[in-house]
Image (tube, grey):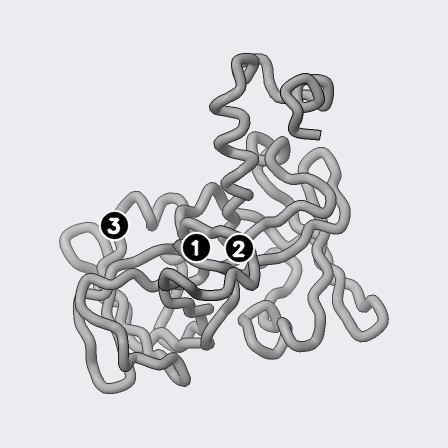
Amino acid sequence: MFTGIIAAIGKIETVQAKGGDLSLQVATQKLDLSDVGLGDSIAINGVCLTVVTIGTGSLSFDVSRESLARTSLGSVQAGSVVNLEKAMAVGDRLGGHIVSGHVDGLGTIMSLNPSARSTQYRIELPIDLSRYVAEKGSICIDGVSLTVNNVGDNWFEVNIIPHTMQETIINTYQAGSKVNLEVDLIARYLERLLPTADAGVSRDTLMKHGFI
């Protein structure tokens, strides 16, 4: 599990094809590796990957076909920058929200517009994920925990403050950029658990079961 609070920006050193999938070597920059061991989980752009090699200031990961099909990692190249977060430890502060590192789908940056000292991003998402995104709810974009400010039928908006812009790769986004999306775990499991899940979750259903 992760929190969506990015610890460092890393840089892809090598991308190597291996037996139909990929091996990535990532320069971890300022990420503290003193407590990282083989087999540990690290989120790279919101994708939970397993450490298979530890170097001096670098980590290596195998990326499966499933991850390549569902995330943006298949398009990274040597020199690409990525968001990094170590798995949270028991007792850590939960500064963002609970993030699993299991990407639900790809979003596309539709527009970015200045909003005082911040920047407002509108992001298109797959229509089958839109029901999990709510105004003032949480969403994870490339591993970054963010608050949804506005929603449409197939898009949502987030506001990025200067600190987040500086400490993540969001400052590299342009219109058309692809981003990894993970919806709020609570929304995903709530739909699965409710008796009326097959018919969709409505406001009336949530009120009936005491959620709102």
Q: Secondary structure at mark 3?
A: loop
Percent position of residue 153, x then y: 71, 34
Between the residue at mark 3 and the residue at mark 1, the CA separation in whole angstroms equals 12 Å
Image mark for residue 64:
3
Amino acid at circle 3: Ser
Q: Do the residues under discs 2 and 1 have CB atoms within 8 angstroms?
A: yes
The earlier-in-sequence mark between 2 and 1 is 1
Mark 2 to mark 1 CA distance (whole Å): 7 Å
Which residue in the structure is indicated by mark 1?
Answer: 72
What is the quadrant of the N terminus in the image?
bottom left
The reply to whether residue 149 is in sight is yes
Q: Which mark is residue 179?
A: 2
- Name the outermost residue toward the right: 116
Q: Nearer the viewer, residue 167 or 122?
A: 167
Mark 3: give few (<14), some (14-19) or many (20+) Cα within 10 Å: some
Q: Secondary structure at mark 1?
A: helix
Return the residue nearer the eye: 79 or 10: 10
Residue 75 position within the rendered picture, expressed as x and y whole percent measured from the top left: 40, 59
Mark sitting earlier along the chain (2/3): 3
Q: Are marks 3 and 1 in contact (CB under 8 Å)?
A: no
The residue at 52%/49% (across/down) is 181
